[in-house]
Image: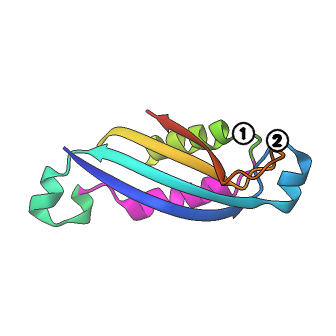
Amino acid sequence: MGCIEIEGMEFYAYHGHYEEEQIVGNRFLIDLKIETDCRKAAVSDDIEDAVNYQTAYKIIKSEMKKKSNLLENIAGRILDAIYEKLDNLKSVTIKVSKMNPPMGGKIKKVSVTMTR
């Protein structure tokens, strides 16, 4: 068993419940953790035997371009797309963080974490 993590992916996107958020946009950070069996790739040194994390990044980048009202929706869509396009996954955890959310006070970020 092994774990692949991509941390701190940053995107500027137009997600949010409020109309202004979908016009002005905001910074989002994404962390991804994939649990998989790495033994074959560790021996073969062949990307065909590994979970291609560049593909995972491209999936996330594509999903971040689609507007959503809720962080939960973003996380769910990313999980769906990763499971649809990648193989040999034991579990996947995604954390979606909105930086400086408009909540009426100084808040660094708000995050949703989902695992499948």
Q: Residue furthest left?
A: 43
Q: Horizontal placement of 40 versus 15: left or right? A: left
Residue for badge 1 = 70
When asked about the image quadrant of residue 23, the answer is bottom right
Label 2–label 1 contact, CB within 8 A: yes
Q: Is residue 28 above or below residue 81?
A: below
SS state under label 1: loop
Q: Name the amino acid, label 1.
A: Leu
> For the residue marked with disc 2, what is the amino acid?
His
State the predominant SS element of the stretch in magenta.
Answer: helix
- On the image, the x and y values in percent for residue 93 come to 43, 41
- Which part of the image, by quadrant, shows the C terminus? top left
Residue 112, picture quadrant: top right
Name the disc covering residue 17, or none. Answer: 2
Relative horizontal placement of residue 50, taking residue 28 as reference (left or right): left
Taking the image as drawn, is residue 23 in sight? yes
Q: Is residue 94 magenta?
A: no
Across and down, in percent, residue 22 comes to 84, 53
Where residue 105 is drawn, which disc sits there? Answer: none
Instruction: Assess disc 1: are there few (<14), some (14-19) or many (≥20) residues with their C-alpha within 10 Å of its C-alpha.
Output: few
For marks 2 and 1 on the same chain, the one whose residue lies earlier in the sequence: 2
Residue at the front extreme? 106
Instruction: Provide the residue span drawn in magenta.
Output: 50-67
